[in-house]
Amino acid sequence: MALNTIPELHALCLPAPNVDELVERRTAFVANRMHGVAVDPSTESMINMLHVTGGRLPVADIGRLHRVDVRTVQRRMVSATGLTPKQMAMVVQFHRALRLRLHDRLDVVSTAIEAGYADQAHMSRVFRHMGGFSPARLPDLVLASFPI
């Protein structure tokens, strides 16, 4: 699907003059997409567990901790985020690896280990698939993030 088929997404991806502009755009994009959408505290907790664990917590464990079955975890997360738990975990893990490379300046091997990839080759495949670049040769990136 081309970015220009979703005008809001296309606008979000345009170059920005500074990081503040990127954060402002992302905040507005998320606010517009989430307008009128309520996420129950249990589902929010499930999503937070994926973030806190860097995408490493198995869906079965999330379900067990919330006393629901795996299918319920999947259904709630897809409803809240549009992503399956596995997809969400991949995105969280990818972003964690990017932060480790960019901000912590870890080498590629250490990044793969710390981010929870099976090995450097696994991380390289994910980087090419999700970002279109190698973890060894990162393009100029700005990772806008909210304070935790």
Image (tube, rainbow, N blue to C red):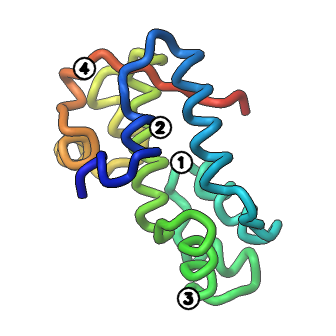
- Cα separation, mark 1 vs mark 4, equals 23 Å
Residue identified by numbered label 2: 96
Give the structural element (helix, strand or loop) at label 4: loop
Quarter holding residue 146 = top right
| Picture coordinates of residue 125, whole percent (x, y) | 18, 47
Which mark sits nearer the N-terminus, 2 or 1?
Answer: 1
The label shown at residue 139 is 4
Give the structural element (helix, strand or loop) at label 3: helix
Q: Amino acid at mark 2?
A: Arg
Residue identified by numbered label 1: 54
- Cα separation, mark 4 vs mark 2, equals 16 Å
- Cα separation, mark 2 vs mark 1, equals 7 Å
Of the pair 9 and 127, the residue shown nearer to us:
9
Which mark sits nearer the N-terminus, 2 or 3?
Answer: 3
Q: Is residue 128 above or below residue 90?
A: above
Residue identified by numbered label 3: 71
| Picture coordinates of residue 62, whole percent (x, y) | 64, 72
| Picture coordinates of residue 131, whole percent (x, y) | 26, 39
Give the structural element (helix, strand or loop) at label 1: loop
Q: Residues within 10 Å of mark 2 (few under 14, many from 20)?
A: some
Q: Amino acid at mark 4?
A: Pro
Of the pair 61 and 44, the residue shown nearer to us:
44
Q: What residue appears at the point 31 percent right and 21 percent down from the top-left corner? A: 107
Q: Amino acid at mark 3?
A: Arg
Q: Are marks 4 and 2 in contact (CB under 8 Å)?
A: no
Q: What residue appears at the point 40 percent right and 46 percent down from the top-left corner? A: 7
Q: Are marks 2 and 1 in contact (CB under 8 Å)?
A: yes
Which mark sits nearer the N-terminus, 4 or 2?
Answer: 2
Which mark sits nearer the N-terminus, 1 or 4?
Answer: 1
Which mark sits nearer the N-terminus, 1 or 3?
Answer: 1
